[in-house]
Amino acid sequence: MKMKHFGKTNFISTLFLATLTLFAVQVFADQPVVKHRQFNGTANVIIGLAGNAKISDPYDSVKKPTIFHYVATTLPHSETVTSDFVFDATTQKGHSISLRLVRPGTGVVDLVAGKIDEDLVFELTFEGKKFQLPVHWTTTQISDDFGTERGAFAVIDPSTEKARVKLVGTSRFTPPPAGKEPPPTFVIRIIAEGELSTTS
């Protein structure tokens, strides 16, 4: 009888430890991973008239070097991004343009497949007016009035934690009416191409 009691107690203890271990593994797996990343490259902003947008003859455009940092908080299959992204420039036609990220973005980062998809909201200031732009920034491809633009993402090298990346996104905005005629709607394409690295 004593041996049977010992066996039962041992089984219960083993079951308890196994359950505790599984719980601990699950909790550990669900813990957020925070990484500080830096983008160093160029940003290209192209603006066209909706319905008649041409890459060869855009309404306006600007391309300039840019560096920005962002903090990525990653959980399984999702990522929240905060960034100091600010893009201030003068376009080819002499207009002042500004872009900045106004709130944390969300997305999915699959480094195995080399894919980044992020849903962001930018504040655009163009010709003295402000617009909220929801942008799906991706390394796959986008389609808009200009046509199709492909992104590109190379899987991060574990030894350097750096990769060449091309993020593409698009959105639309309509200025407020200035007279009796309805204002035109513009399409905007935002492309960032350069080196992505993990800083900490």
Image (cartoon, grey):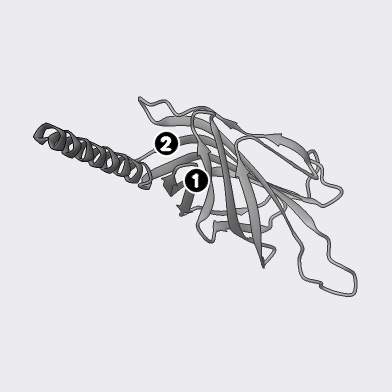
Q: Quadrant of residue 152?
A: top right
Classify the position of the N terminus by image quarter: top left
Tell me the CA gap for discs 1 and 2.
Answer: 19 Å
Name the one closer to the observer, 118 or 96. 118
Identify the secondary structure beneath mark 2: strand
| Residue at 37% from the left image edge and 44% from the top image edge | 33
Type of residue at label 2?
Ser
Q: Residues within 10 Å of mark 2 (few under 14, many from 20)?
A: many
* Element on which disc 1 rests: strand
Q: Residue furthest bottom?
A: 179
Image-based side of 132 in relation to 36, left or right:
right
Q: Residue at x 74, y 50 (%)?
A: 60
Whether residues under marks 1 and 2 lie with C-beta atoms below 8 angstroms apart, the answer is no
Q: Where does residue 78 sit, x and y in percent of width and height? A: 50, 45
Along the horizontal axis of the image, is 182 left or right of 5? right
Q: Is residue 179 above or below residue 146?
A: below
Q: Residue furthest front?
A: 1
Q: Residue at x 78, y 46 (%)?
A: 58
Query: Percent from the top left, x then y, of residue 119?
Result: 59, 50
**Sequence order check: which comes first, mark 1 or mark 2?**
1
Image coordinates for residue 117, horizontal then vertical, percent: 58, 42
Residue situated in front as seen by the camera: 192 or 33: 33
Q: What residue sits right under mark 1 in the picture?
A: 78
**Residue marked by disc 2:** 197
Amino acid found under the numbered disc labelled 1 = Ser
Query: Residue, x 52% and y 35% (percent of image)?
Result: 194
Q: Is residue 116 left or right of residue 72?
A: right
Quick one: label 1, few (<14), some, or many (20+) residues within 10 Å? some
Specify the quadrant that holds the C terminus: top left
Q: Nearer the viewer, residue 94 or 70?
A: 70
160, 61: nearer the viewer? 160
Check the image and name the residue furthest to the left: 2
